[in-house]
Image: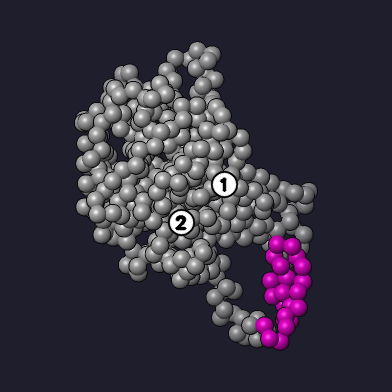
Amino acid sequence: YFDYRSWSCSLCGAVNPIGKKSRYYNVQHRSRLPELSSGFVDVEYTGKKGNGGKEDGDLRAAFVALVDTTGTEDQLELVRSAILAGLEGLAPNAKFGIVTYSAQGLGVFDLAGQGASCWHIPLPGDFGESREAEEYVNGMLDEVLPLELFLVEVGTHKEAIASALESVKSSEGKPSPSGAGACYGAALTAVVAYLSGLEFSQAGGQEALNDNPTGIIYSRVMTFMLNPPPSGAGRVDSGKRSAPTRRAISLTETFYSKMGSHSSCCGISCDLYIIGRDKETDYFDLASMRYLSKKSGGKIFYYPSVDECNAPQDVFTALSEPCALNGIFRVRTSNEFKVAQHYGQLEEHHKYKNLYHFATCDKTTCFGLDFKFSSSGFSRDPEVAPTVQLAFQYSVFEPEDDGEEEEEVG
């Protein structure tokens, strides 16, 4: 609130003098300033350099398909069609990579060479039960293939991507060297750590950061799941509610909830495309898995059978619709009241109060806030209305301008 030569903060009430060199010193000019003529202020910034001096076109936004190969050939054929359809929804300069998982471990594709090649890496069967297994999984992909070879531009490598997908075969019925089944939790953890450069531990949550060590501002991991995960963290047990099963379901829910929060803090959203075989016998525990997509800002689709699967259309729609990436949401209030609770996919910053992070949001996303009084009186000054100030910062991937990002603050 402005006086002739001073202004009062609507949040704390402090009175501040206006210096002669300030743009607010000219009383007549004040009314024409955009930040004072409207309750909404938009500022656009086009970045030229990313983390570590990298150009925005290098490793700034990434899309990864994480494919379960334990299903049938019919299921995998649908997955191939869905991924190829999704490529049509991406900009030519978007970065893309493929990882497969099964009882035999991970398959990581090098798409940047003359022909697509695949590195096969075993996964520990005790992931989620020992710290050593967690440390191994968090760093395993960095030692095998640099991100620059794993992530390639869609426009110039579409044939290599299609060739890699054709080479993916069903591993149904093939035993694991360790005797364990496919460990989806370990596969997802490895991919998230690979893209973000940040370790995940079930023992503690990830502190939210402004930038990932890898320089990628946003990633989207699309899991194509064909069977319920049978082993390790995130495993899905039978739907029967015995006491051990109830405990296992609780641990499964905890894993997906923590992984969703961690992914959001890393600027990674996780989509789940679940293609079943028999809706009478399949049990995927969607009630637990939904936390992964809900907290990270991703989507979850369940198709009871191959005949009822619309994955190609859904993947194309999801990847072609506009969205805000790697956002920060700040809430400030005058001292009569404060934030009591927040809802939606907001993840609170580990250090700063009322500062929240989210990996992505689109036109269907909704955030909610509850406020509570912090004193018996409502207004400290009849002339100063109680005030809430919201700042919303996000990035947008611009395909037409060689991948430059635009950052908007509202």
Q: Where is residue 317 in the image (x, y as percent from the top left)?
A: 30, 48
Q: Which residue is drawn at 23% across and 40% down?
A: 167
Query: Foreground mark, 2 or 1?
Result: 2
Residue 346 seen in the figure: no
User: Tag on residue 347?
Assistant: 1
Compared with 134, 114 (above or below) is: below
Q: Where is residue 227 in the image (x, y as percent from the top left)?
A: 34, 27
Q: Which of 262 and 313 is in front in this view?
A: 262
Residue that badge 2 annotates: 216
Q: Position of residue 314 (x, y in %)?
A: 29, 43
Q: Is-magenta flag for residue 230?
A: no
Asked whether the residues under the numbered discs 2 and 1 touch, taking CB atoms below 8 Å apart as contact, a structural biologist would say: no
Compared with 190, 282 (above or below) is: above
Q: What stretch is highlighted in magenta?
A: 1-22
Q: Residue at x 41, y 58 (%)?
A: 59
Give the CA separation, mark 2 to mark 1: 19 Å
Judge left or right: residue 405 versus residue 253: left
- Identified by mark 2, the residue type is Ile
- Identified by mark 1, the residue type is Glu
The dominant secondary structure in magenta is loop
Q: Nearer the viewer, residue 326 or 3?
A: 326
Q: Which residue is drawn at 46% across and 27% down?
A: 125
**Image quadrant in which you'd find residue 2:** bottom right
Q: Which of 77 and 348 is in front in this view?
A: 77
User: Tag on residue 264?
Assistant: none
Q: Residue at x 56, y 57 (%)?
A: 210
N-terminal of the pair, mark 2 or mark 1, is 2
Q: Position of residue 410 (x, y in %)?
A: 53, 64
